[in-house]
Amino acid sequence: MISLPAGAYALVTGASAGIGEEIARSLARRKVPQLLVARSAEKLSALAAELRSASGVAVEAIPLDLEADGAAERLVAATEGAGKPVGLLVNNAGFGWYGPQSEQGLERTLRMLRLNVAALVELTDRLLPPMRARGRGLVLNVASTAAFLPVPYMSVYAATKAFVLSYSQALHEELTGTGIVVTALCPGTTRTDFHRVAGLAPGERVRFPSLSAETVAEAGLRGLARGRAVVVPNLLDSAWIFTGRLVPRAIPPKIAAALFSRLKRAPRD
């Protein structure tokens, strides 16, 4: 069960679509007040209004681009600084991009690092002190099964998720006994717009059993409530992750390269 201090909110980034939206819906079913963050003001406001009506609890939209300079600081000012304490932080905002690194473009790569890594760390770092002062807190960081191996043709994305996994596991141990739980959610193939946003041609994806975003969201929240450090929602993903640890380190990237090199990219502008 997700339990927050009286008057506290869940803060969900990247809440306007995909896994973030389903986490927000799952929290609304649990009657958890929320502060929803994403760039898309229209979609976010519509979702907040829908969840307010359905749940009867406070759900507020905060349109914000977390890639922008000072965005995390402004977000903390609009939450903790405005008398809306954050009892649960869901760091879900992020994106990936497919293709050889030499063709991805430096600006896109730096944007990915700012959003997937820097914004996540800054938000967590700014919100942990008030959580510690209250003696309670929950942090759910959305990583990926890509965190468990290098992924050619999505090299930076996989590296950002490896960072999120390592960072989350370390914080989980550091914060043992403080009343704060940090969990890394590591979904594999999920039925969202991720592949389209990543620049893949319509219908292109690694052929592996997928889960719905709702299933992934529920698995993450259940694992967080149980105090788990890492949640891998798909049992088949857990199996290949375990198997990958038994073979030489050079083998998994070769397998990943064989799979990802065959995917087709959408036409570039």
Image: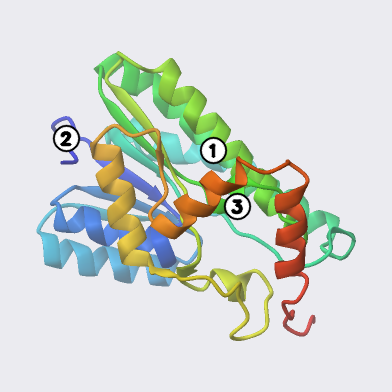
Q: Residue 234 at what x, y percent from top left? A: 40, 58
**In terms of sequence position, does the residue under pointer 1 or pointer 2 come before the other?**
2
**In terms of sequence position, does the residue under pointer 3 or pointer 1 come before the other?**
3
Q: Which residue is mark 3?
A: 146
Residue 200, placed above or below residue 257: below
Q: Are marks 2 and 3 in contact (CB under 8 Å)?
A: no
- CA separation, marks 3 and 1? 10 Å
Q: Residue 123 at what x, y percent from top left? A: 49, 35
- Between circles 1 and 2, the one closer to the viewer is 1
Residue at image point 60% right, 59% down: 95
Q: Which residue is mark 1?
A: 165
**Which one is nearer the viewer's eye here, 85 or 221?**
221
Residue at image point 72% right, 60% down: 255
Q: Is residue 111 visible?
A: no
Q: Are marks 3 and 1 in contact (CB under 8 Å)?
A: no
Residue 90, placed above or below residue 175: below
What is the three-letter code of the residue carrying label 3? Ala
Q: Mark number for residue 217? A: none
Mark 2: few/some/many CA within 10 Å (<14, 14-19, 20+): few
Q: Residue 182 at what x, y percent from top left? A: 39, 31
User: In the rendered view of the protein, which quadrant contains the C terminus?
Assistant: bottom right
- Between circles 2 and 3, the one closer to the viewer is 3
Please indicate whether residue 244 sits to the left or right of residue 155 in the image: left
Q: Which residue is mark 2?
A: 7
What is the three-letter code of the residue carrying label 2? Gly
What is the three-letter code of the residue carrying label 1? Leu
